[in-house]
Amino acid sequence: MINRIIRQIQRYKGWFGGGAALCIFLGLYTGLLASPPDYYQGELVRIMYVHVPLAHTSTLAYSVLFGGSIWYLWKRDPLVDNMCQASASICALFTTLALITGSIWAKPTWNTWWTWDPRLVSFTVLLLILGGYLMLRRLVDDPMRGGRYAAILAIVGGIDLPIIKFSVEWWRTLHQPMSFSTRGVSISDDILIPLTLMSLGCWLLFAYMVMVRTQILYLTDLLHAKKGRLLSQTHFSQTTP
Amino acid sequence: MPFFKTIHWVVWKDLISEWRTRETMSSMLFFALIVILVFSFSFSMDQDAARQLIAGIIWVAFTFTGIIGLGKSFTSELQNDCLESLQMSPAPKGAIYLGKVAANFLFMLAVEILLFPLFVLFFNLDVIEAVGTLLIIFFLATLGLSAVGTLFSALTVQIRAREVMLPVLLLPLAVPVMIAAVEATRGALNGDPFSFYSQWIHLLIIFDIIFTVVSFWLFEFILDS
């Protein structure tokens, strides 16, 4: 009765969690302790090892939400809907943390806590879209209609992602341009290693948190269906044995 | 063919019912007047400051007024099971969407054209040369706002707290359209040469196309019951 994928999540989620903890620990050690300070920014650059992975994990998380929403509208699989809802909450968490760490970095570097440049604005808009998504899910009583409406919102909101990504190139902003590009990597190994480790750690952490949250949401829906309370409204009413 | 006939009849229906009751336009116009009044108190502006701020004030007023009109567009369908009739009708759902967008666009544009002379009066703007460009900017930005606003109006009409959710969902998504509209309007009102702000007009066109196409595709998922 319990979906095959949920069983696999139960079996493998520990690996993701452990891997995330290991990578983040190693990344923080090399980033905060073992790497040299930056030529221009000194010790301040160490926030980059936390801020940058959080920011691009949050865009990765929104891409997962975007793809999952399209998949849900196409296939109407309830597990995909649960995964979308999980991704949205975790993406909101990572976006908030990225904004906070970015703001902490900005104060000593640019001498302001906040600026209205295109990348920060579009990133804040992403957080607002996610907030609207989570509100929408709470307000709709019928889970199937709620899933559909939320998927529609996530797809239209996906238009913000390319704006975030390319805003640094399209407009001259205070933000640094991308260091990774098809022309090759433009930063040194000392910085690259902790950055890669932290990025990998954040991706694994995101995967772990989404897996656990999806499992919780799925099992909650299953519980409601089995108790018969929402028999006419859940996805499982067609599949009870 | 049923597609264009559907669009025609949806627009006709909305215009006729508006003509008979005049409730949407009158509430939009009064709300916009109040917004202008509040803004005139909020900033003590000399001529230079007015020129910096007025583009933003115009578009804030137009956007919030537009949200009222967009909300009414589908809440008026809740009476007499009209929404269920739309869901059940064999007409192509995309055509219903385009008809609603066209009707909302016409209402919003009418309010903007009626209101803009009041802005010129109250804030002493100098706009004679820029009128044509301003009309183009109003046209494009209103199209973008109604394209994505109609989609979210249909989406929020059947949920709790619909009056709150429409602006909460719409405004973050409308941010690119609003920024482009404000920058283009500021350029036009300041008398800058067209090439200075033409990139914003290009951005408006791009967003209009993207929002209309994406919303057109997504609209049928809303009216599925």
Image (tube, coloured by chain):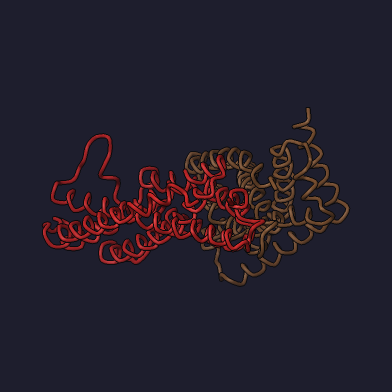
Chain colours: A red, B brown
Taking the spot 26% from the left edge, 59% from the top edge, the residue there is A50
Instruction: Identify the residue shown where x is 57% and y is 48%.
Output: A152
Find residue A104 and report its horizontal and vertical position in percent: 30, 66
User: In the image, is A241 to the left or to the right of A211?
Assistant: right
- The percent position of residue A111, horizontal first and vertical second, equals 29, 65
One can see residue A181 in this view: yes
Image coordinates of residue A59 in percent, x first then y, are 39, 50
| Image height of B127 relative to A32, above or below | above
The correct choice, above or below, for B71 with respect to B199 in the image is below
B111 relative to A42 in the view: left or right: right
Left/right placement of residue B150 relative to residue A68 reads right
Number of marks in the rendered image: 0
Q: Furthest-front residue in view?
A: A241
Q: Position of residue B194 (x, y in %)?
A: 52, 40
Q: Is residue A126 left or right of residue B128?
A: left
Residue located farthest toward the top when viewing the structure as drawn: B1
For residue A229, which quarter of the picture? Answer: bottom right
Residue B27 figure quarter: bottom right
**B134 relative to A123, above or below:** above
Which residue is depicted at the point 39% across and 54% down? Answer: A211
Q: Give whichever of A104, A205 is nearer the camera.
A: A205
Quadrant of the image containing the N terminus of chain B: top right
Q: In this view of the protein, which residue sits in the foreground, B10 or A135?
A: A135
For the question of whether residue B187 can be seen, the reply is no
In depth, the one of B80 and A169 nearer the eye is B80
